[in-house]
Image (cartoon, rainbow, N blue to C red):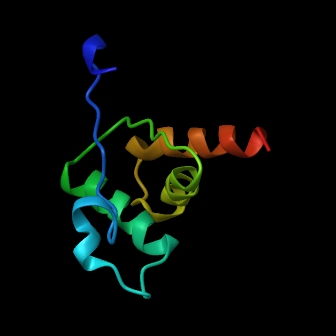
Amino acid sequence: MTDKGVMVYRPSLTGQGERVHLASPNIALTTHIQDDVNMIVFEDLREIIPAGHSYGGMVIAGEADAVPDSPQWSAVDELVKLLLSLK
């Protein structure tokens, strides 16, 4: 995707990868949803198209309810509608 000029962001999830030192029994799906939302907000990302598979799909599906209400988040809503239609 980056070869085509698309900006790609890979959020780091609390307790995994380079953030494994933050692992604890208190980490849940909501923690990882907030990790993604924080990246979106802090990077001021707009017109985003989240992508994920398996557990990552659950994380991005949760973004639609967690991102601030604003027109730029419509891509998240559309992706969630698409994911739900595939069930």
Above or below residue 20? Residue 51 is above
Relative depth, front residue between 7 and 28: 28
Placement of the N terminus among the 4 image quadrants: top left
Above or below residue 38? Residue 30 is below
Residue drawn at (37%, 35%), measured in percent from left and top? 47
From the viewer's perspective, tell me whether residue 22 is left or right of residue 70: left
Placement of the C terminus among the 4 image quadrants: top right
State the image coordinates of residue 21 (x, y, percent, origin top left). Answer: 23, 76
Question: Quadrant of residue 15 in the image?
Answer: bottom left
From the viewer's perspective, tell me whether residue 38 is left or right of residue 67: left
Relative depth, front residue between 2 and 23: 23
Question: Quadrant of residue 61 in the image?
Answer: bottom right
Relative depth, front residue between 47 and 56: 56
Residue drawn at (41%, 73%), measured in percent from left and top? 31
State the image coordinates of residue 16 (x, y, percent, origin top left). Answer: 34, 65
Relative depth, front residue between 86 and 46: 86
What is the total number of numbered labels drawn onto the structure image? 0
Residue drawn at (30%, 12%), measured in percent from left and top? 4
Residue drawn at (33%, 79%), measured in percent from left and top? 23
State the image coordinates of residue 68 (x, y, percent, origin top left). Answer: 39, 60
Looking at the image, which residue sits at the far top? 4
